[in-house]
Amino acid sequence: MKLFLKITFVFSCLAILISSCISPSDKYLYDGLSRIQSADYREAVIDFNKSIELNPLNTNAYINRGVAKFLLGDYEGSIQDNSKVIEFNPKDAEAYSNRGIDKVALADYNGGIQDCTKAIEIDPKKISAYNTRGGARTASGDLTGAISDYNKAIEIDPKIAFSYSNRADVNNKLGNYIKAIEDCKKALLLDPRCAGAFCTRGEVENNLTEYYAAISDFCKALEIDPAYGDAYFGRGNAKLKLGNKDGAAEDLKKARNLKRNKAFGQIEIINTK
């Protein structure tokens, strides 16, 4: 997953049905959701602020403001918003799942695991929680537990690409290269623009000394996500193995500047029911 968190964790926005007659608070809420869709996250936060000012009990505004803050890198602010939702409704699985993502982004893996476990207790089919917990377990070294979480996410919905991409990442770490390649292929069949799958396949190809194939896959990942630090890192290593020291140095410098943002998967923002 890409930290990204790509710590390819699943971050889901709350889907809301828009009626023909809405309150002033919900009007700002819908404006904020529209701004998230257009990647205007700062303005989205402003809209959600106005929504909350008009209705301090509007949990939809809090949870979506948390999403916008997360996307701005304000993980602590997102935690505060998700905690507020939990204060209003201790059975809100979405808030626990999203707060788990916030904590993983801050490298609080145990806290992320705890929140995702709570989300799963409330909603055993919460795919985002399984993917996030799998990422946290990967970062904590519990690769077997991570595989179990990704297996469960795939069992619940076998048509979500990043679940396969995340599992491929762990299979690669376990040395299960054939399984990792198979998962990458499945991810790319579902989503041809799954950067995490291209990057992980490149990492597998590096491990198998197939450096030209690896460079091709890292290039594809970077075409999709030009800020993908691990793709630069992997491509730099492949170039180094092939004797291209200048090209390797350039890629590794970029990876360093981007802080190798593929911690253990790829965060995806999706609309869910």
Image: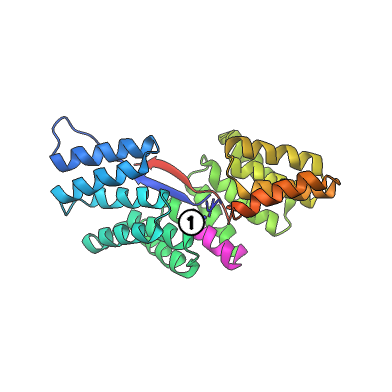
- In the picture of the structure, the residue carrying the numbered disc 1 is 132
Q: Is residue 62 above or below residue 80?
A: above
Q: Is residue 142 magenta?
A: yes
Along the horizontal axis of the image, is 93 left or right of 207?
A: left
Along the horizontal axis of the image, is 173 left or right of 213?
A: left
Residue plotted at (58% across, 52% down): 261
Q: Front-most of 155 and 90?
A: 90
Question: Picture quarter containing residue 147?
Answer: bottom right
Q: Residues within 10 Å of mark 1 (few under 14, many from 20)?
A: many
Residue plotted at (63% across, 39% down): 222
**Residue 14: in sight, yes or no?**
no
**Element assignment for label 1:** helix
Q: Front-most of 199 and 51?
A: 51
Dominant secondary structure of the residues highlighted in magenta in the image: helix
Q: Front-most of 40 and 149?
A: 40
Amino acid type, mark 1 = Thr
Instruction: Count numbered badges in the picture.
Output: 1
Q: Position of residue 66 (x, y in %)?
A: 33, 53
* Residue located farthest toward the top when viewing the structure as drawn: 20
**Residue 235: in sight, yes or no?**
yes
* Residue located farthest toward the right when viewing the structure as drawn: 243
Q: Front-most of 251 and 207?
A: 251
Q: Position of residue 176 (x, y in %)?
A: 72, 54
Residue plotted at (60% across, 34% down): 189
* Residue located farthest toward the bottom when viewing the structure as drawn: 110
Q: Position of residue 107 (x, y in %)?
A: 50, 65
Looking at the rendering, the stretch of residues picked out in magenta corresponds to 132-143
Along the horizontal axis of the image, is 94 left or right of 250?
A: left
Residue plotted at (40% across, 58% down): 75
Q: Is residue 227 above or below residue 118?
A: above
Question: Picture quarter containing residue 202?
Answer: top right
